[in-house]
């Protein structure tokens, strides 16, 4: 740091330094609390150690006055330990004043730092010089700069500057310079600190040794001077080469991991500001507020890079800063070509920040020329030369294939000032806190239940008192002794006193209940709020992306973002970036026309894309709309038919909304040619998949010639979801509202049956009807009633009506992930705890739909209307029939069902193995020759499983040879039967022999 008056300190670094300085200064203050007590060795060593820590930290943030102050402190105590001085009152007063100054710096606010330095630098130097004077130290070397001097004007740091300027290499810390002192004077502060003399033990140097050392040094210096003379011409040639290009040094230097992380965070924030500001500056080149923000951002990056000695970053950031300063002073004007170069420099800064932690990175060797070209281009911009544009046009803009740099929406910095400090915390810890707060909410609700039970006790006590009153009235009419009446009166008084006490305690408990419920609710709300971030975080870089794509396509496009402060869950923000990216890229490529096309159609030359985020009905609504050409519905209709997706007749009957849904199918694109930006039919399919995973919805509308409108409806958070609670087999289950298409109350008479399947009419279509208890395999199936509740779920391909017993209302549930040891639980996504403490399972709608389709494909769906109470009572034993032949399966199923057995079917051994592990069966009947898994393998798996080995297994096969029978029985089959035996009662007799009759 060149001047104490204008420090360049990254915000995060300054905060850390202030915290450390406050801790160390407090330690020093405690040591000097009693000036009358001499310091012992242990105190001195602690004082020295603390001073060195302050010195090292001050060097990182480059505050010279504090560096000098800590050095002179260390020097005083070192001399005191050597018994060279005594700590008299003069020393103590100056040390105390210096410690007070350190404490005051640790408490200064960042916005008043410059004022503090202006007022306190002279005080620090007075203390330093005062202590140096007491020690008889020459202070000329310490007074190298006047703190009141105005810093010199900035100079352009050329990439070739290696001996002077900000990219100069620092001398190795391992080699100490020779310290020369004037006769009769002690070394200066900096000289003496550099010597690093040992404090407690010193090695005595004799005159002879000293003379030998001097002669050796003279010989070495003589040799060095001769070498310098010989290489003088070579150095000149090297300097000429350095004037042309800067050698890109290694990025794998040793950097403290903590410092590196802070640098990367600082660089990320400031490159976002640079990207956003440059894109905005392109539309308004003379905006002074934009230029000021850009200058400060590049200045901060330079300062942060200098702290960890990243000269590559320092050079580019410094030259960028000079460009912005020159633009502020109207020396140059930043045109589009200049902004292109500056944006490439921003990408370079991002790449360097990310690669500097990679050991052995070869990036520098591959991109040295490009780095040099960027540096030269920046200088050319400052010289208002056309060289800048020509120099970079011959090189690729791709820097080590980095992604498009993402930027943040930068508004007036004065309006963005906030007092909130950001604390980094892992998502896992936040989830733990959410779980604990949810349990607290549940436990706080228990107090109310307990209070209600006490109200019942109070009622009973009132009844008791009434009984005592009645007893007293009866006793008074009888001839009872006075002593008995006295005891009765005492009992009555005690009962009344107990009632009053219970009433008071009950009131106190109700008050505590109100407070605890309120506090638990507030805590839960705040923890949930801690997961929320502004929508702005998910659209960083979109303006830069739109600008770059538009320029590559020869279009003029402006991106407008509305609703940046809208609060959204962090998980949603992360998941929404990719979908929005694809939608906006498609809008630029497909939707917005070229300037000529827009002018010919009567539009402005520049197209507009609007992204709007807002809260709507407890959901996050994100709308992306453009004023481009829109979608030609009739052309889309023909495209769908040409691709063979639907027939001509079906396409003709489709609505606009149904046709636009094809845009989100995989592999579908309205583009004939494939480009780097779009045309593969992948982008919008990714959008649909991502929105689906977030339990959201997507819809599109269009007007030909006026643009396309895509609306995403997403939950505000994935941690708390709105659900419909339903009763399935006397247990609560939760359906996410976002995945429910409709909730119907149907009459029994409205159910239609076709091909042994049940259907109901929904929005003009017939949808399959299934029993929720059968899908979830809860055991007891739903009772058929005249009116039934149906939950309609599905995707863009199909819908199903799921019958449930009853609705328990809508609830907001805090999602609790299932234990990973359970693996993936079929049809279940997560769990939650209700307000009364009852656990409930949240349905995975996608998985449920797959389970329904599996049941339907295997013809295992039962009819809801057949499940009356009588049938459930008469439900027979359950048999699994496994055969790849449809005819054999149906013959066996009908034969067994005609005798009262309940039959499930599987199409091969693999399907049967999945079923037998997820359901309970009394008997398995299997074929031998089947695809994927044959019957022998299937039987072997069952018999080797401890949980399934007791299930009887019958093999039914066309093969009736003895060797085939032996193979089956050896695998573990309990019975072997030939398929020719179906014509008589052999199959039924064998089943009865193995498991008995269907109902016994």
Image (cartoon, rainbow, N blue to C red):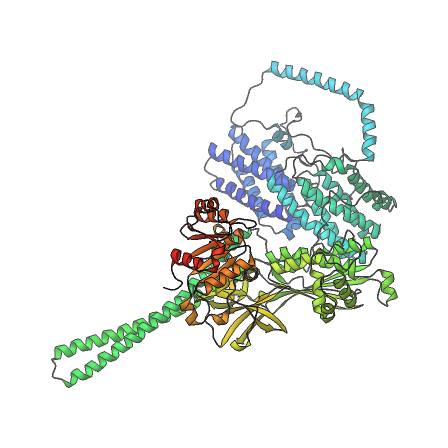
Q: Is residue 383 above or below residue 407?
A: above
Q: Position of residue 759 (x, y in %)?
A: 57, 71
Q: Position of residue 59 (x, y in %)?
A: 63, 39
What residue is at 76 percent from the left and 45 percent from the top?
Answer: 398
- Of the pair 98 and 396, the residue shown nearer to us: 396
Q: Is residue 445 above or below residue 389?
A: below
Q: Position of residue 964 (x, y in %)?
A: 48, 46
From this viewpoint, is residue 460 visible?
yes
- Residue that sits furthest to the bottom in the current view: 477
Classify residue 803 as left or right of residue 626.
left
Q: Which image quadrant: the C terminus?
A: bottom left
> How many numbered badges does the structure rendering display?
0
- Of the pair 60 and 754, the residue shown nearer to us: 754
Classify residue 705 as left or right of residue 941.
right
Q: Position of residue 845 (x, y in %)?
A: 56, 62
- Of the pair 457 and 925, the residue shown nearer to us: 925
What residue is at 46 percent from the left and 64 percent from the top?
Answer: 897
Q: Quadrant of residue 353?
A: top right
What residue is at 62 percent from the left and 48 percent from the top?
Answer: 12
Q: Quadrant of residue 848?
A: bottom right
From this viewpoint, is residue 738 visible?
no
Q: Which image quadrant: the N terminus?
A: top right
- Of the pair 716 and 116, the residue shown nearer to us: 716
């Amino acid at each position: 740091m060149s001047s104490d008056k204008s420090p360049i300190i990254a915000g995060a670094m300054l905060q850390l330094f202030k915290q450390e300085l406050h801790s160390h200064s407090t330690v020093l203050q405690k040591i000097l609390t009693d000036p009358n007590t001499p310091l012992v060795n242990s105190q001195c060593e602690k004082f020295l150690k603390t001073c060195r820590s302050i010195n090292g930290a001050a060097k990182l943030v480059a505050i010279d006055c504090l560096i000098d102050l800590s050095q002179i402190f260390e020097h005083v105590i070192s001399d005191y330990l050597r018994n060279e001085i005594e700590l008299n009152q003069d020393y103590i007063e100056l040390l105390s004043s210096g410690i007070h100054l350190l404490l005051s710096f640790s408490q200064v606010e960042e916005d008043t730092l410059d004022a503090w330095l202006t007022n306190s630098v002279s005080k620090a130097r007075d203390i330093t010089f005062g202590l140096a004077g007491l020690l008889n130290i020459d202070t000329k070397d310490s007074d190298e700069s006047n703190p009141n001097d105005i810093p010199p004007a900035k100079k352009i740091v050329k990439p070739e500057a290696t001996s002077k300027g900000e990219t100069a290499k620092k001398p190795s810390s391992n080699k100490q310079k020779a310290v020369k002192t004037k006769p009769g004077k002690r070394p200066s502060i900096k000289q003496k600190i550099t010597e690093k003399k040992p404090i407690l033990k010193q090695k005595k140097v004799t005159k002879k040794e000293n003379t030998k050392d001097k002669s050796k040094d003279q010989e070495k210096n003589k040799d060095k001077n001769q070498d310098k003379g010989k290489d003088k011409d070579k150095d000149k040639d090297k300097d000429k080469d350095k004037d042309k290009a800067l050698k890109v040094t290694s990025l794998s230097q040793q950097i403290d991991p903590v410092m590196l992380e802070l640098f990367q965070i600082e660089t990320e924030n400031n490159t976002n500001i640079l990207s956003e500001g440059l894109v905005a500056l392109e539309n308004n080149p003379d905006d002074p507020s934009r230029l000021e923000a850009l200058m400060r951002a590049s200045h901060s990056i330079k300062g942060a890079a200098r702290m960890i000695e990243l000269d590559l970053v320092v050079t580019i950031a410094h030259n960028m800063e000079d460009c912005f300063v020159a633009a502020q002073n109207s020396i140059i004007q930043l045109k589009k070509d200049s902004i292109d170069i500056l944006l490439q420099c921003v990408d370079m800064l991002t790449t360097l920040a990310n690669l500097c932690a990679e050991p052995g990175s070869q990036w520098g060797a591959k991109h040295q020329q490009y780095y040099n070209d960027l540096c030269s281009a920046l200088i050319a911009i400052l010289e208002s030369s056309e060289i800048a544009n020509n120099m970079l046009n011959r090189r690729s803009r791709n820097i080590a294939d980095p992604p498009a740099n993402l930027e943040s929406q930068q508004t007036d910095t004065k309006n963005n000032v906030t007092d909130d400090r950001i604390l980094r915390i892992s998502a896992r810890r936040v989830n733990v806190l959410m779980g604990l707060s949810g349990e607290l909410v549940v436990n706080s609700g228990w107090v109310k239940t307990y209070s209600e039970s006490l109200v019942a006790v109070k009622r009973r006590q009132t009844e008791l008192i009434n009984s005592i009153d009645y007893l007293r009235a009866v006793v008074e009419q009888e001839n009872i002794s006075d002593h008995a009446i006295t005891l009765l009166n005492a009992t009555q008084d005690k009962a009344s006193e107990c009632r009053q006490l219970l009433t008071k305690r009950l009131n106190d408990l109700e008050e505590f209940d109100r407070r605890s419920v309120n506090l638990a609710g507030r805590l839960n709300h705040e923890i949930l709020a801690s997961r929320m971030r502004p929508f702005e975080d998910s659209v960083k870089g979109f303006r830069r992306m739109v600008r770059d794509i538009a320029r590559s396509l020869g279009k003029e496009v402006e991106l407008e973002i509305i609703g940046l402060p809208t609060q959204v869950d962090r998980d949603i923000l992360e998941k929404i970036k990719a979908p929005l990216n694809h939608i906006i890229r498609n809008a630029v490529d497909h939707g917005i026309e070229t300037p000529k096309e827009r002018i010919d159609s009567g539009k402005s030359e520049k197209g507009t894309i609007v992204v709007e985020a807002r809260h709507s009905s407890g959901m996050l609504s994100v709308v992306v709309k453009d004023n481009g050409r829109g979608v030609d519905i009739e052309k889309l209709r023909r495209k769908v038919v040409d691709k063979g997706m639907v027939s001509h007749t079906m396409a003709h009957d489709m609505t606009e909304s149904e046709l636009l849904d094809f845009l989100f199918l995989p592999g579908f694109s309205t583009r004939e040619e494939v480009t780097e930006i779009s045309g593969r039919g992948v982008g919008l399919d990714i959008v649909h998949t991502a929105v689906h995973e977030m339990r959201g919805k997507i819809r599109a509308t269009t007007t030909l010639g006026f643009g396309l409108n895509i609306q995403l409806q997403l939950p505000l958070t994935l941690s708390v979801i709105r659900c419909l609670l339903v009763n399935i087999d006397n247990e609560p289950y939760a359906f996410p509202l976002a995945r429910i298409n409709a909730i119907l109350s149907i009459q029994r008479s409205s159910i239609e049956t076709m091909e042994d399947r049940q259907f109901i009419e929904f929005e003009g279509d017939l949808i399959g009807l299934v029993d929720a208890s059968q899908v979830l395999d809860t055991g007891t199936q739903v009772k058929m009633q005249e009116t039934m509740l149906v939950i309609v779920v599905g995707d863009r391909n199909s819908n199903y009506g799921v019958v449930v017993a009853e609705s328990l209302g809508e609830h907001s549930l805090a999602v609790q992930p299932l234990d990973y040891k359970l693996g993936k639980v079929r049809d279940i996504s997560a769990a939650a705890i209700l307000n009364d403490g009852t656990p409930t399972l949240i349905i995975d709608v996608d998985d449920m739909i797959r389970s329904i389709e599996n049941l339907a494909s295997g013809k295992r769906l039962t009819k809801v209307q057949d499940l009356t109470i009588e049938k459930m009572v008469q439900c027979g034993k359950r048999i699994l029939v496994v055969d790849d032949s449809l005819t054999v399966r149906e013959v066996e199923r009908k034969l067994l069902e005609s005798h009262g057995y309940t039959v499930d079917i599987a199409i091969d051994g693999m399907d049967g193995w999945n079923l037998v592990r997820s359901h309970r069966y009394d008997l398995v009947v299997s074929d031998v020759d089947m695809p994927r898994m044959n019957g022998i393998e299937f039987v072997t798996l069952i018999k080797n499983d401890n949980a399934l080995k007791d299930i009887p297994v019958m093999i039914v096969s066309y093969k009736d040879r003895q060797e085939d029978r032996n193979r089956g029985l050896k695998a573990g089959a309990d019975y072997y039967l030939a398929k020719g035996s179906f014509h008589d009662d052999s199959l039924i007799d064998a089943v009865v022999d193995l498991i008995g009759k269907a109902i016994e």
